[in-house]
Amino acid sequence: WFDRAHSIYFDYLSETGIIGLLTYLSIFVIILWRFVKPMFYFLRPEKIKDGANHGGKLAVERALVFALPVGYLVQGLAIFDVFPMYINLFLFFAFCHYYFYVQQPNQK
């Protein structure tokens, strides 16, 4: 590992260029946007009086979707990616797919 930068940002920038770095960061921007977007929907006046429940998502799930990418990106300032980090990253991506795209049985 002597030839790797000790920052995921510099590592992706040196290996894939600015386009690769922006593409990599856009994954996390899209995840955080998908997380924040429903909050704006539930802040509408007609939704507040009906009692917003954030689409039936549990508070723990919402906390995980916000905290895990933030923690990963802050950790990436000083540590380069290794295999166990990739496993956790792709498990997080799978959880986000479930969280954002898999319909719950009571939803249509």
Image: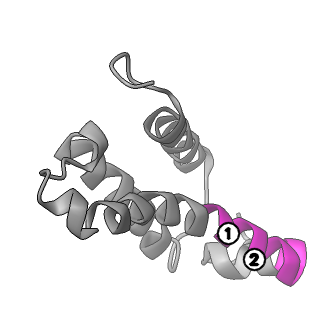
Residue at (23% x, 58% y) in the render = 47
Looking at the rendering, the stretch of residues picked out in magenta corresponds to 14-27
Residue at (38% x, 58% y) in the render = 38
Is residue 3 among what the camera can see?
no
Q: Quadrant of residue 61?
A: top left
What's under tag 1, amino acid-wise? Ser
Q: Which of 47/52 is in front? A: 47
In the image, which disc is placed on residue 26? 1
Above or below residue 61? Residue 42 is below
- SS at circle 1: helix
Say whether marks 2 and 1 touch (CB < 8 Å).
yes
Q: Residues within 10 Å of mark 1 (few under 14, many from 20)?
A: few
Left or right: where 17 falls relative to 38: right
Residue at (43% x, 38% y) in the render = 99
| Magenta-colored stretch includes residue 20 | yes
Residue at (40% x, 65% y) in the render = 36
- For disc 2, the marked residue is 22
- SS at circle 2: helix
Magenta span: predominant SS is helix
| Magenta-colored stretch includes residue 56 | no
Q: Position of residue 35 (x, y in %)?
A: 42, 58
